């Protein structure tokens, strides 16, 4: 028996900024998490990532806010929209998922635009990420090396170690099919 919260997130992408609203409207799902990868203004080569949540009717409306961090990018390479599929997501589920993703990226030294939620939750969480190509509605098998989908592990577990009584992060980078 798992002692903690299990969240399965289906990520749909990689979308271009202009395609997000129309695609999102065509779906029968509520997207409450998003990942953005691109070049920050005045950045020469480094790719920056932004992880966020939105609890509005349409996530694409959040990206249109005049003070949103997407405006810090000179070029957006990709956007992924995420939905928690194994349960009806509460505000706290979305917040915990965002904290897990942001904290993982911060611990790995990845460049993030956002600095909120770099602290992990105070409970055990098991996060499973599934990467779906938005157009083909099938698993994304090949993506560019710099894609946030390649940098994000498929499984992130944050749990209390029985021996030390400390919380630790465990990851599985990419799950592979056994044939």
Image: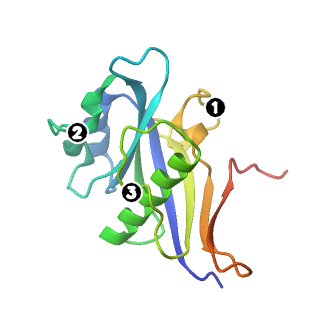
The spot of residue 162 in percent (x, y) is: 71, 81
User: Which mark is first along the chain, 3 or 2?
Assistant: 2
| Above or below: residue 117 compared with residue 125 | above
SS label for mark 3: loop
Q: Residue at x 14, y 35 (%)?
A: 66
- Per the rendering, the mark at residue 177 is none
Q: Nearer the viewer, residue 104 or 91?
A: 104
The spot of residue 9 in percent (x, y) is: 49, 57
CA neighbours of label 1 inside 10 A, class few (<14), some (14 to 19), many (20+): few
| Above or below: residue 45 compared with residue 21 | above
Residue behind mark 2: 68
- Looking at the image, residue 80 sits to the left or right of residue 71; the answer is right
| Above or below: residue 48 compared with residue 99 | above
- Per the rendering, the mark at residue 117 is 3
- Looking at the image, residue 145 sits to the left or right of residue 113; the answer is right
User: Which mark is first along the chain, 3 or 1?
Assistant: 3
SS label for mark 2: loop
Residue behind mark 1: 142
CA neighbours of label 3 inside 10 A, class few (<14), some (14 to 19), many (20+): some
Q: Quadrant of residue 170?
A: bottom right
SS label for mark 1: loop
Measure the alpha-carbon separation of dots 2 and 3: 16 Å
Residue 171 visible in rendering: yes
């Amino acid at each position: 028996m798992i002692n903690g919260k299990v969240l399965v997130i289906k990520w749909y992408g990689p979308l271009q900024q202009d395609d997000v609203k129309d695609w999102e409207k065509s779906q029968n799902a509520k997207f409450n998490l998003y990942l953005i990868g691109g070049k920050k203004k005045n950045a020469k080569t480094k790719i920056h990532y932004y992880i966020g949540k939105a609890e509005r009717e349409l996530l694409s409306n959040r990206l249109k806010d005049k003070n949103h961090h997407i405006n810090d990018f000179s070029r957006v390479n990709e956007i992924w929209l995420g939905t928690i599929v194994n349960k009806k997501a509460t505000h706290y589920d979305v917040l915990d998922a965002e904290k897990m993703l942001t904290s993982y990226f911060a611990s790995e030294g990845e460049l993030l635009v956002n600095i909120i939620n770099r602290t992990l939750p105070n409970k055990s969480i098991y996060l499973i990420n599934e990467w779906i190509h938005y157009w083909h509605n099938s698993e994304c098998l090949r993506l560019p090396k710099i894609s946030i989908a390649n940098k994000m592990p498929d499984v992130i577990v944050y749990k209390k170690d029985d021996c030390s009584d400390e919380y630790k992060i465990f990851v599985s980078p990419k799950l592979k099919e056994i044939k």
